[in-house]
Image (spheres, grey):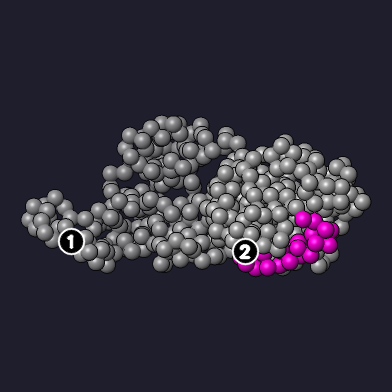
Amino acid sequence: MQVSDVMERHIVTVTPTTSLQDIGKIIFGLHIVGVPVVKGRKLVGYVTQTDILRKLYPTYQDFMEDYVHAKDFEAMEELTEKVFQLTAKDIMNRDVITVYPDTPIMKVQSIMLVKGFGRVPIVDKKGNLLGVVSQADIFRAIVGQKLPFEKDEVFHDWMSRYFPLLQDWKLRLGKEVPDLTKLFRKQGAKKVLDVGCGLGLHAIALAKEGFDVVGIERSARMIYTANRKAQKLPESVKKRTYFICHEYENLEKITGDGFDAAMFLGIGLTHNRNPLKVLQEVEKVLTGKAVIVIQLANFEKVIKVNKRLVDFEIRPSSETYQREHAFLRFYDPKEDGLVNYNVAVFDRGTKQWGFRGMNSTPLVPLDKEKTTALLRKIGFSKISYFGGDGGFYYDYLFRKPFKKDTSDQLIIVAKRR
């Protein structure tokens, strides 16, 4: 594979007269380590984060001539304003190592490793800038495209760090728990199985309403957090909650039986490649008059109407050095019939936003018809459908009919007869 196959062609450049303040904005805003300097199309230099920071540090001669002031780190920060007045030509590296478009990418990777570079410019025979390639570009080409998507439990381990901030949980629980409580009490339910319980927030809320709740989750991080929350509960509530980290199989041995209700909240059921098998396992531990509640995203609306956007949330940060987090969630339809669930996280400090990380996992895009067929296979034939349109997971569960074109979520309530 040649470097031309993976290089970034649409790149931001600066001229020799561009100020370091403007260069700093570009580097920080685009989350890159450096920027090429050009005259016309010809590459004449390169400015990196290190080049800018080096201007703030004293030289060896400074140490020799004035050792005390050379260690004044507060003064170094104040020097930033003066450094910002410099231009690219004042600090740029003029002896730039470049490669041609037909250079093998592993050769470029070797150059970067030996020289300690993160990015290398690509030029033609006349020295005109054609593009830039980074180690990340090469990693994606060589490794990233060949990696399978994260297993569901790995994805949720990653998500556990952001889950408390991902949604307005006070608003969500305030809408959903009263409806669940009313339904379960009407059914005479006392013991509830929460499959894919996450951080255990619904389970704890239901335990406070007097139900005995067992939460099961494949993510060890999620269950660890759920158990920590449970330990802080009053003894009367704590004894009604129990959290288990395990695959959704052999539930009779793991959770016991006698459950009057089971719930799959969020899009929990869709995280299973074989949702029928999971439902069959759950059915074995339910009583004859049990009820199943399944909450799903309206995948068809998200993909066709919302242009794949699930939601975008900006939430206050719990970290002292960050002010806010932004969460972007969207779906990508796959050729194999699955949907990739993507979550991107951004942080804002005192001034600027920065990219923090992203992760993905495949989902089975269950809809009304598919889920109904699955439920009938396990003997649940009395099925009701409800919808919510107050945003994803911010509406009551059982108070509105499901509308295929407008509902953000689909909630299914199933009984045996």
Q: CA distance from mark 1 to mark 2?
A: 47 Å
Judge whether 409 appears above or below 217 on screen: below
Give the residue drawn at x 11%, y 59%: 68
Residue 364 placement: quadrant? top right
Q: Secondary structure at mark 2?
A: helix
**Position of 385 compared to 245: left or right?**
right
User: Neighbour class for label 2 at 10 Å: few (<14), some, many (≥20)?
Assistant: some
Residue 348: in sight, yes or no? no
Query: Label for residue 72?
Result: 1
Q: Amino acid at mark 2?
A: Trp
**Position of 388 compared to 220: left or right?**
right
User: Neighbour class for label 1 at 10 Å: few (<14), some, many (≥20)?
Assistant: few
Q: Residue furthest right?
A: 417
Query: Label for residue 169?
Result: 2
Q: Main secondary structure of the magenta part?
A: helix
In the foreground, 11 or 395: 395
**Position of 185 compared to 239: left or right?**
right
- Residue 45 point in image, percent of width and height: 32, 49
The part of the chain drawn in magenta is 168-190
